């Protein structure tokens, strides 16, 4: 019975966010009468709402409950001022993702009016190997997660998407060494992202932060210090001992606003570490 | 049976976001064995997750589904660049709320590092009469909603909270006449908000936008043009005929970035309407 309710909710997706009763019945594989009864119960609780065309959509009650998910909105709230700094510095896409299963789920994205279009959306998922945030999360994931991703086919989005386990292993080792990653044209050839890890109070990598910018004319290395400073700021706010124990110069950097990136700044940060 | 699942989910709230099995049983009023079985089903679907202390929390699957709610994240996505402009102009709290029942539900909030503390949070609720966004939504709500709020006791948060139906009726009439509201010290004496309505493609008021700033030293009138310009920008992006039909000068204003507020700007906007 619980399963049947879940099947009804599972009928909704970003491509199918408004459904008629018969579409819900078809996608959930439940009889129309059962669907009718269960949709009624979900609607009266607030999990579903009816729109002006009479179609069903996910209701605000789900939004309210989802706001209690610790890895979503709670993390988002702590991260917001740092995301805001990066947004102001770049006016591009700033996103925060967490690991769920073998994918990254985006829990926040700030986008400027003129920002490059990205396929990710809040609440959406993408494969780990093909995104900057995903590579950060995968590099620090449990061994079993890494092996599962390395064993499965690596979905190819563009000619630049990481395509072999060997290549992926090499990139993951680099990520662990560097503390950041530049993911260039992996999902769309025209975009690149710069990502860095966010550590929680146990110094576990709890999330990853990235800025997505147009590849053309971008100097990704110039973005690295701002992205790392923002990631460190969030880690400190989460109580990460590692972020709190940074040398004083880097702490000042992490505590101050992430300024528009510049070569000088990058070099001075590099020196501090 | 559906009801029992909902009771389990209803046990979670912002004050009780991590619960043991026995706490869920207690708050939902269900027997421990039933709770155990249903929590298991909810957890295997992803609606609940277990944290490192073994307590249950709302899971990411809820977050994913909630991201499909049209009045939540979809609205938020359209509004984001305009919220970003207001955030940059003020570095305070910028929030977007929608009407649900007799309350406002906040669907987004951007907050600066130095922003004044606010009680609202994303996914949280507040009464309509006591908040700027709530007064906007109530002023344009169906008659039945207005009467229900006017008939019920008006919860008092501070000495400045609207306390009588007469006072509330007067404020609502002003809101409809002015197209904005200044809510001063109603929830916390030290804060004020400036709010304006967001119209959708049928020119219905679909949401309200506000900036919350410290009362001390604030010149709320100086914020009005920026808040209204952002609200109009979102309305135009939603296809509001009314916002699209604005005089050319006001459309330029709405289309341009909401600049830091100034007297001059406010007057010139006033002239355009």
Image: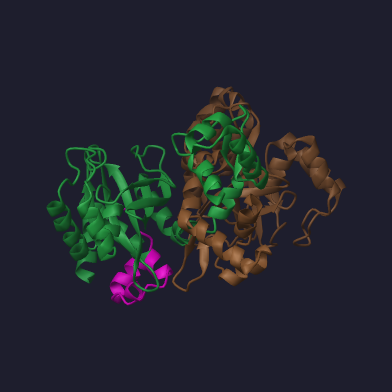
Chain colours: A green, B brown
Out of B213 and B124, give the one closest to the viewer. Answer: B124
Where the C terminus of chain B falls, by quadrant? top right
- Residue B16 position, x and y percent, is 60, 66
Task: Write the start and end of the magenta stretch as one range.
Answer: A234-261
Residue A60 located left or right of residue B181: left
The quarter of the displayed image where residue A244 is located: bottom left
- Residue A58 position, x and y percent, is 56, 41
Could you tell me if residue B47 is visible in this image? yes
The answer to whether A12 is drawn above or below residue A171 in the figure is above
Could you tell me if residue B218 is visible in this image? no
Q: Image point 43% across, 68% down: which residue? A: A237
Q: Image point 61% across, 49% down: which residue? A: A61
- Inspect the magenta stretch and tell me whether residue A256 lies in it: yes
- Residue A119 position, x and y percent, is 35, 39
- Inspect the magenta stretch and tell me whether residue A147 lies in it: no
Residue B96 located left or right of residue A149: right
The quarter of the displayed image where residue A234 is located: bottom left
């Amino acid at each position: 019975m619980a399963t049947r309710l879940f099947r009804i909710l599972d009928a909704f997706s970003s491509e199918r966010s408004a459904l008629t009763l018969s579409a819900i019945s078809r996608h959930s594989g439940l009889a129309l009468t059962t669907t009718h009864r269960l949709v009624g119960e979900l609607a009266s609780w607030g999990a579903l709402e009816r729109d002006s065309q009479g179609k069903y959509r996910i209701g605000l009650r789900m939004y309210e409950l989802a706001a209690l998910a610790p890895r979503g909105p709670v993390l988002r709230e702590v991260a917001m001022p740092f995301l805001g700094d990066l947004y102001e510095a770049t006016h591009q896409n700033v996103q925060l993702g967490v690991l769920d299963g073998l994918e990254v789920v985006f829990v926040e994205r700030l986008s400027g009016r003129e920002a490059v279009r990205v396929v990710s959306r809040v609440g959406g998922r993408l494969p780990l190997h093909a995104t900057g945030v995903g590579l950060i999360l995968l590099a620090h994931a449990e061994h079993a997660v890494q092996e599962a991703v390395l064993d499965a086919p690596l979905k190819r989005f563009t000619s630049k998407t990481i395509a072999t386990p060997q290549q992926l292993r090499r990139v993951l080792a680099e990520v662990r060494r560097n503390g950041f990653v530049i993911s260039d044209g992996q999902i769309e050839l025209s975009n690149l992202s710069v990502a860095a890890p966010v550590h929680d109070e146990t110094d576990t990598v709890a999330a990853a932060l990235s800025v997505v910018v147009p590849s053309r004319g971008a100097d990704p290395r110039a973005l690295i210090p701002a992205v790392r400073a923002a990631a460190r700021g969030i880690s400190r706010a989460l109580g990460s001992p590692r972020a709190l124990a940074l040398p004083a110069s880097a702490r000042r950097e992490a505590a101050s606003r992430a300024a528009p990136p510049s070569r000088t700044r990058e070099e001075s940060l590099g020196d501090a570490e």
